[in-house]
Image (tube, rainbow, N blue to C red):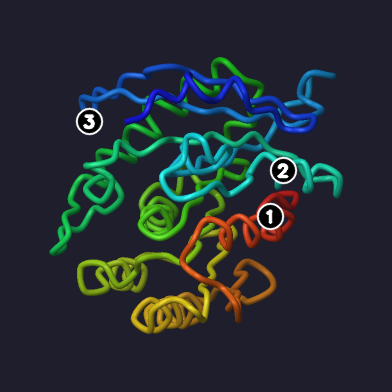
Amino acid sequence: MRPLLRFLPRWRARRGQLHVLPAVYSPELDNRRDLLVFVPPSYARGNTCYQVIYMHDGQNLFDAATSFAGAWGVGEGIEWASRRGVEAIVVGIPNIGATRIDEYSPFVGAEGGGKGDRYLEFVTRTAKPLLDERFRTLPDREHTGIAGSSMGGLISLYAFFRYPEVFGFAAALSPSVWFADGAMLDVIARAPRLPGRLYVDIGRREDARSVEFARRLRDVLLEKGYVAGRDLQWLEDPDGVHHESAWGRRFRKALPFLLQAAP
């Protein structure tokens, strides 16, 4: 993994601030990675506690210099949401490269997978307690979310249904629900309907398999009882491609839905 500390001090959001927690050890996975913590502009001006979104592929979120495929511009997205009255801390969790697919799926497929539960144990048992200790967070499930794209979208969906005591909302952008023959759809179909908010999208310019499985995911969620416009936001982006630039644009617009006041 590229040493993020070498790059990130050069980056500045317009008024928010990016912190790096270096080389956090995961006993669950026996590896280390930096955690990238973006706090909104008002964080330094008061004692407010904030909702938190945990995001995968952390090196792609803030700065193209650390990315393997382009940056989302999440810092600018949080700034945009802040001007509209919704704020959050974002925790970027970088992938380790060669183990990305293994960590982002609890299911074993032709491409890998199988370590998703251990990865989420790292997020929930190691990373989250550390963040709750060092930053002013709202630690309850109603104010804790998880988000990602592609395989990161798959593991975000799994986290929402597998760890309902931790995560109260999730965003899955272009999720790889086709992975392992659509095993995620079976997990959701068997799971109880959980309170919370789900954002799911797909780009129509992505490959046909991804579009088909995303629509099947939408249908499973609707059959489960989630209501479009209330606790489910579904978007088909007519011009959307499978790329960080598209995900960053859509994620920004999803933030008001994800960060709305908990009931």
Q: What is the three-letter code of the residue carrying label 1?
A: Arg
Marks 3/2: CA–CA distance:
31 Å
- For the point 51% across and 49% down, the residue is 70
Badge 3, how many Cα within 10 Å: few under 14, some, many 20+? some
Residue 125 image-quadrant placement: top left
Circle 1: element type: helix
Amino acid type assigned to the residue bearing label 2 in the image: Glu
Q: Amino acid at mark 3?
A: Leu
Q: Could you say which is closer to the camera, residue 163 or residue 257?
A: 257
Camera-side mark, 1 or 3: 1
- Badge 2: residue crowd in 10 Å (few <14, some 14–19, many ≥20): some
Residue 193: image x %, image y %? 46, 66
Dot in front, 2 or 1: 2
First in sequence: mark 1 or mark 3?
3
x%, y% of residue 128? 47, 28
Residue wearing tag 1: 252
Q: Which residue is mark 2?
A: 76
Q: Do the residues bearing badges 2 and 1 touch, measured as CB atoms within 8 Å?
A: yes
Tell me residue 227's x, y (percent): 61, 76
Quote the CA–CA distance across marks 2 and 1: 8 Å
Q: Say above or below: 10 vs 168.
A: above
Q: Whole-Å distance between the Cαs marked 1 and 3?
A: 31 Å
Q: Secondary structure at mark 3?
A: loop
Seen at 46% across and 83% down, the residue is: 219
Residue at 64% across / 28% down in the picture?
11
**Mark 3 or mark 2: which comes first in sequence?**
3
**Circle 2 SS class:** helix
Q: Classify mark 1: residues with Cα within 10 Å, few (<14), some (14-19) or many (20+).
A: some
Q: Residue 71 placed where, x, y %?
A: 55, 46
Q: Quadrant of the N terminus?
A: top left
**Residue 29 circle label:** 3
